[in-house]
Image (cartoon, rainbow, N blue to C red):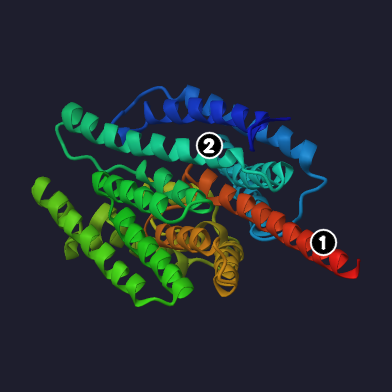
Amino acid sequence: MKLKIKDRYFSIALFVLFVIYMLFTISDLSTSRQSGFKDVDRSDVYRYLILMTSYLFVYAVFNIKKLKLQQPLTSLVLMALWTILVNILNGVSVWVFLVRSNMAVLWCLSYIFFNRLRSKEGGGKSSIEICSYILLLFYVFATIYYFFDMMVRLKRIPVLNVVYYEMALLPWVLIVNSGKNKKWIYLLSMIVVMFSMKRGAVIAMVLMLLADSYINAKKTHSYKTFFRIVATVFLFTMAIILTDNLSGGFLSQRFSGEELTEGSGRAEQYSIIWEYIKDGDLLELMFGRGTEKSSQILGLIVHNEWLYFIFCFGLVGLFIYASLIGSFITKSVSELKKNSDLASACCTMTVLYFVLSMLSTTYNGYFGFWLFGFWGYLNAELEIRQNCQKQDLNGVKANGTM
């Protein structure tokens, strides 16, 4: 069901999801270790998460008939089935199995929901646009709020993963924005990235800016755009230096050689996991050890999803994961070749995903809801535009024969 106000559709289904999601994310932020809360009851977080998954599942059941099984949905479904199977065979604990299985299924449901919702809206303006704007601004506020809140409450400079939610929503907004609006959106994003103190976020933002600027240069064939690339990166670098000075060198210390190799225990993690991979038998190499093994050895997940997947889900899991990222790259290259106005959104999302897959996590973070739902939305948008082009072409042909 949808309401139409002026020239824009407002989906009741999206409104319901938005309410559930906000209940989930507010509960999550107010009880998460990432926000400086330890040993806090998180039962409400999981209740809202189950409610959201159930709601999306019901929506998918009623809309599955018209769904096209295309990439990256194919890889998402295969990954969900494979992770569930491997975890069952390796006898992971019930809680770990439920959490990881729910997450894998949720990514598929996110894709399906936004794909079918956008398809139903047709060629009109989408209510998804407004939703993505509101949530992006919400996470901008949340990042800045928790930065100062944790500074006062914990008496230290925080490092905030919540910035990845805002960055995951940035390509959604780029689907329908260009020019001055896009500049303001990027400016907001850069400010939030500096507040987050996240190395991965800084690296990803610089590369996203460069990718977007390159695409604009390719479209305009203008050297002015090239100089804008240099100027933008220079200004962002200067802003980082200023932020570093204000933080007493905290950010530059996180980019020191020692921190980059040893930060968050990454070097030790990689070494331990790689030794296990080398010493494992053929079955473990092919099919993996299950999700729980990583946390048993390290106490957390590996901060590199390529290593994580080959360790936990074997070469088969790694192949499916590679096909997932490959589908992002293929779609981005395709839109780039067509000189499409959707190329910036595709490429920036692909850059963000790849950087985080190397330095942090994507598939195992709840901002994956926006990373994967994006491609469902995008595929529906592409199909709508193709149908509009066909209708226009048919109309021209019909007029020509009259």
Residue 395 - label: 1
Which quadrant of the figure contains the C terminus? Answer: bottom right
Instruction: Quadrant for residue 392, please give it.
Output: bottom right
Instruction: Quadrant for residue 239, please give it.
Output: bottom left
**Closest to the observer, 215 or 398:** 398
Say which residue appears at 43% left-offset and 47% top-offset.
Answer: 295
Label 1 Cα crowd, 10 Å radius (few <14 / some 14-19 / many 20+): few
Left-right relation of 251 to 391: left
User: Mark 2 — residue?
Assistant: 131
Please say if 224 is above or below 184.
below
Say which residue appears at 38% left-offset and 48% top-offset.
Answer: 185
The residue mark sitting in front, 1 or 2, is 1
Q: Is residue 150 visible?
A: yes
Label 2 Cα crowd, 10 Å radius (few <14 / some 14-19 / many 20+): some
**CA separation, marks 1 and 2?**
34 Å
Indicate the amino acid at tag 2.
Cys
Callout 2: SS? helix
**Closest to the observer, 94 or 247:** 247
Q: Is residue 86 visible?
A: no
Please say if 193 is above or below 75.
above
